[in-house]
Image (tube, helix red, strand yellow):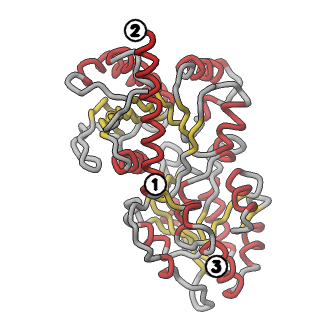
């Protein structure tokens, strides 16, 4: 097997502004890889800002929730990809993040060199892949065709593998599980979780719903719950609202007396502060109920628990099973304001402290990815590249 001193990764992404893209770039760089980043933007203005020292290759604009527009953008990018990639050094590995970028990854491999391994990074299963109509069946067929020779499937939840890729026979590739853990490259043993607010009878309990805010059902449930509790609970929302899912988000939140939206935040830089201001983390997502939202292990699960915040989850989901196995968190059997009130009503200062301590006692590696994880990711990709190089040498001989 050929040895690769510095791995060069071409990373193709669907949204350059996605905080998870930045986290993956940091992981690759911290693990010792050189990264060329290319992707679409959710803005009409050209991408000029650097992402952790990288100037991304701009593939053009796309719009959230506009599937036809995104297909057209992929077609245009495919035609212009040769010119976009002109001048970059041949990568050792190409990673396509999400299905549309897997298509471009295959196109890039054709343009650059046929022996470059392609890894498919899939952290969500889009609802268009899960129906039984002609469009969904065509999408699944396209995924099977594009992923037929994928060298690696990178995903964030075992349920994605078990309940989708394996059950439907979508991708038959080695799997690397990369959970949505908090990235912390420091060697410091200092623990900022001690800054978390304490329970008090004089102040309202606070629920934090942070990250990708895309679930209308959660928003309405939390609004009904806080009105029912008459100020004893409040909800703080932070992150990026999906206006394609609820264009009335700002007006709705503004009209609710116990909900407030505090805007975006930087991950991981702001996590200790924002989770230090809440008692509970909303780890529920009904966006694709019974499917993707039942399978995922969301960022907010790891973020909240990293800082000792008690998560709230639905019991019959992968998140619920994850917490039940560790006897942690507040698990709901039914999505209703009444059920949420009944479960949280059992909580007092003493039981909250015990629930929090249970989380803090868990091994740090359950919630945090460190330098060792970054190196393990790059080593896995190096092994792909080395194997591909060896295969190519054998074929050439």
Q: Residues within 10 Å of mark 3 (few under 14, many from 20)?
A: some
Image coordinates for residue 39, horizontal then vertical, percent:
35, 34
Question: Depth check: 131 or 145 in front?
Answer: 145
Residue 264 seen anywhere in this rendered image of the structure: no
Occupied quadrant, residue 143: top right
Please tell me how crowded label 1 is: few (under 14), some (14-19), or many (20+) other residues with Cα within 10 Å. few
Q: Residue at x 52, y 24 (%)?
A: 150
Which quadrant would the C terminus be assigned to in this image? top left
Q: Quadrant of residue 207?
A: bottom right
Between discs 2 and 1, the one toward the N terminus: 1
- The earlier-in-sequence mark between 1 and 3 is 3
Q: Position of residue 117 (x, y in %)?
A: 44, 25
The image shows a total of numbered marks equal to: 3
Choose the circle earlier in sequence order: 3 or 2.
3
Which secondary structure, mark 1? helix
Residue with the mark numbered 2: 396
Considering only vertical position in the picture, is 197 above or below 306?
below
For label 2, the crowd category at 10 Å Cα-Cα, with few meaning under 14, some 14 to 19 and many 20 or more, is few
Q: Which mark is residue 357?
A: 3
Q: Which one is nearer the viewer's eye here, 40 or 387?
A: 387
Q: Secondary structure at mark 3?
A: helix
User: Which is closer to the viewer, label 2 or label 1?
Assistant: 2
- In percent of the image, x 61 and y 77: which residue is there? 233
Seen in the picture, residue 53 relative to 328 is either above or below; the reply is above
The circle drawn on residue 372 is 1
Near-viewer residue (183 or 229): 183
Is residue 83 visible in this depiction of the protein? yes
Whole-number angstrom distance, CA of label 3 to CA of label 2: 59 Å
Q: How far across and how far down the image is residue 302, in percent?
A: 56, 60
């Amino acid at each position: 097997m050929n040895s690769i001193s510095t791995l060069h990764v071409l990373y193709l992404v669907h949204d350059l502004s996605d905080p998870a893209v930045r986290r993956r770039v940091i992981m690759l760089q911290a693990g010792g890889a050189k990264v060329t980043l290319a992707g679409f933007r959710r803005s009409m203005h050209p991408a000029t800002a650097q992402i952790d020292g990288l100037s991304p290759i701009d593939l053009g604009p796309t719009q959230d929730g506009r599937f036809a527009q995104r297909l057209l953008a992929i077609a245009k990018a495919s035609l212009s990809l040769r010119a976009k990639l002109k001048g970059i050094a041949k990568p050792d590995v190409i990673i396509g993040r999400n299905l549309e970028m897997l298509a471009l990854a295959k196109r890039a491999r054709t343009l650059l060199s046929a022996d470059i391994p392609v890894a498919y990074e899939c952290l969500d299963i889009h609802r268009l892949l899960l129906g039984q109509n002609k469009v969904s069946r065509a999408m699944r067929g396209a995924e099977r065709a594009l992923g037929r020779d994928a060298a690696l499937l990178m995903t964030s939840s075992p349920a994605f593998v078990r309940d989708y890729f394996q059950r439907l026979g979508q991708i038959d590739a080695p799997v690397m599980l990369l959970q949505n853990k908090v990235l912390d490259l420091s060697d410091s043993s200092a623990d900022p979780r001690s800054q978390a607010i304490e329970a008090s009878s004089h102040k309202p309990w606070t629920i934090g719903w942070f990250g990708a805010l895309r679930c209308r059902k959660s928003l309405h449930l939390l609004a009904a719950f806080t009105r029912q509790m008459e100020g004893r609970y409040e909800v703080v929302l932070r992150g990026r609202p999906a206006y394609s899912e609820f264009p009335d988000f700002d007006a709705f939140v503004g009209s609710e007396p116990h909900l407030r939206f505090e805007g975006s935040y930087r991950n991981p830089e702001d996590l200790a502060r924002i989770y230090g201001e809440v008692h509970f983390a909303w780890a529920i997502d009904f966006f694709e109920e019974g499917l993707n939202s039942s399978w995922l292990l969301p960022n907010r699960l790891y973020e909240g628990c990293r800082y000792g915040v008690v998560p709230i989850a639905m019991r019959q989901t992968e998140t619920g099973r994850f917490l039940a196995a560790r006897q942690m968190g507040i698990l709901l059997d039914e999505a209703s304001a009444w059920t949420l009130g009944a479960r949280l009503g059992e909580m007092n200062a003493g039981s909250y402290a015990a629930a929090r301590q249970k989380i803090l006692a868990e091994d740090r590696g359950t919630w945090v990815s460190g330098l060792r994880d970054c190196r393990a990711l790059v080593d896995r990709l190096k092994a792909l590249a080395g194997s591909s190089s060896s295969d190519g040498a054998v074929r050439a001989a």
